[in-house]
Amino acid sequence: MNQTTPAAATRHHRLVQRFVTIAAGFVLVSTAVIVDAILDQGVPPLVSFVFIVTGCAFVVFGAFWRDRRLGELLAKSSLAILSIAFLLAGLEAVFRAIKFDFNRLHEFPESVPIYYRPPTLPAGVGVFRRPGPASWNGKVLSAYMRIHGTSEGPYADEQPVTAEYDSFGFRNPADLTDWEMVVTGDSFVELGYLPYEGLFTTLAAKRLGVRIKNLGVSCTGPVSQTFYVRNYGKAASTKDAVLCLFEGNDLNDLDRELRNRASFRATGQAFERQSQVSFIRALCDEFKLRRRAAELSLERVTSNALLVSANQERPMTVYATPPVWDRLSRNKRETLVRALEDWANTAREKEMRPWVMYIPDSHRVFHGLIRYFDTNSAVAHWKPGEFAAPLGQICTNLNIRFIDTYPSLRAEAQAGRVPYNLIGDTHLSAEGSRVVAEVIANALETRQGR
């Protein structure tokens, strides 16, 4: 009967330790490569470097170490690394096999106002709308502050509103079956924190004595908005269609929507609505979301400036550096022109007169009335440049009627009134909505000779 000698057992034990250590090294190097392939934006170079260098070190020490204590320490560490790697690999394989969509975990709860939820119901080629009918009751701006990890602050006295959405997910009465005008745009048209009676579309309709359908949806751009008007905007009496272009994010939204459309045509899924079945990617996304939430709670909902007007100083948040037409890339300008041309063609095909209404960022409207806390910041160094005038000229070239809301909003600010929310959310205030309603009503009355 063969018996293993102590020396042989020791050699066998050390061989196992070497094998485990070298295997852990290869796993660390492979992890950097595999995870980089799984993640859309790849692994940060520093993280990848650490994994590769550490993995190579394990391989080298595993092959050449001589010290017994070091060997045991490396082996124990390697076992932990291999256990974690096998666990992650197993979970990755299982979730991919059952096609579990981790995006479901990030759907907004009912406590989040509909206004702050992106549209998720597929409606067209890479286009989404909100499900309906639906409603939400509560303090919308206060909820915004809580979402970003802070107190209600300046919105503590906000009055609750009930935001009602029709069967297609738009802010219109359920019994609206005919209308003379349709207005589309993003969150500046939806204005989900104002009661229906306070929307500029409702106020303008009352002033003009007509019915206006509101097709405003947060987190959308000109591609979606043109689709909405084509499919939901025409009624028997509709003669005018207004696209509201907000300079703050509509150019970026346009790029995103075009990418969604291209992705949908190629794969059947919009790139930002693709199923996410990777467990490893879900872990990384969760880390990013938590880090981003921490950043938002620390920075984005606090005041970083003062609005100084009418002998008053009001805390405010300044986010953006509004676009300057001449500084936009040629491709971005041409993309916008094509989108506006598509808008005009769509309206005319539906026998409606196309309009574009320009809505400026609050930073532009309040510029010169702001005292910045950090005078070296990018927002403090921003200087206004032309955007509305070139946009208006493009609309003229395309035979689109153009409305510029800037002069009236600026006049309000200079008079000491506040046409935008000041902290965190910087959309139109109730006062600003009233001003825009007057602007659009005046434009329609002048054009149509009312």
Image (cartoon, grey):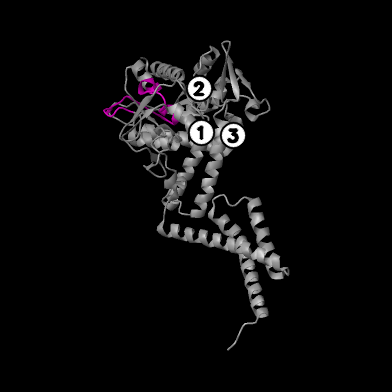
Choose between 248 and 419: the one closer to the eye: 419
The segment highlighted magenta reads 172-201
- Side of 72 relative to 395 (left or right): right
Residue at (54%, 49%) from the top-left corner?
A: 284
Element type at marker 1? loop
Mark 2 or mark 3, earlier in chain: 2
Residue 55 vs 15, above or below: the answer is above
Residue 54 vs 365, above or below: the answer is below
Choose between 84 and 379: the one closer to the eye: 84
Residue 60 visible in the shown view: no
The residue mark sitting in front, 3 or 1, is: 1
Q: Position of residue 356 (x, y in %)?
A: 45, 27
The residue mark sitting in front, 2 or 3, is: 2
Residue at mark 3 to residue at mark 1: CA–CA distance: 31 Å
Q: Which mark is residue 154?
A: 2
Residue at mark 1 to residue at mark 2: CA–CA distance: 14 Å
Q: Position of residue 220 (x, y in %)?
A: 44, 36
Residue at (66%, 64%) from the top-left corner?
A: 74
Q: Is residue 152 magenta?
A: no
- Side of 369 relative to 215 (left or right): right
**What residue type is disc 2 on?**
Pro
Query: Looking at the rendering, which quadrant does residue 58 occupy?
Result: bottom right
Query: Looking at the rendering, which quadrant does residue 77 occupy?
Result: bottom right
Which residue is the site of mark 3?
Answer: 328
Q: Is residue 188 magenta?
A: yes
**What residue type is disc 1 on?**
His
Which residue is the site of mark 1?
Answer: 148
Residue 124 visible in the shown view: yes
Element type at marker 3? loop
Classify the position of the N terminus by image quarter.
Answer: bottom right
Q: Which mark is residue 60?
A: none
Mark 3 or mark 1, earlier in chain: 1
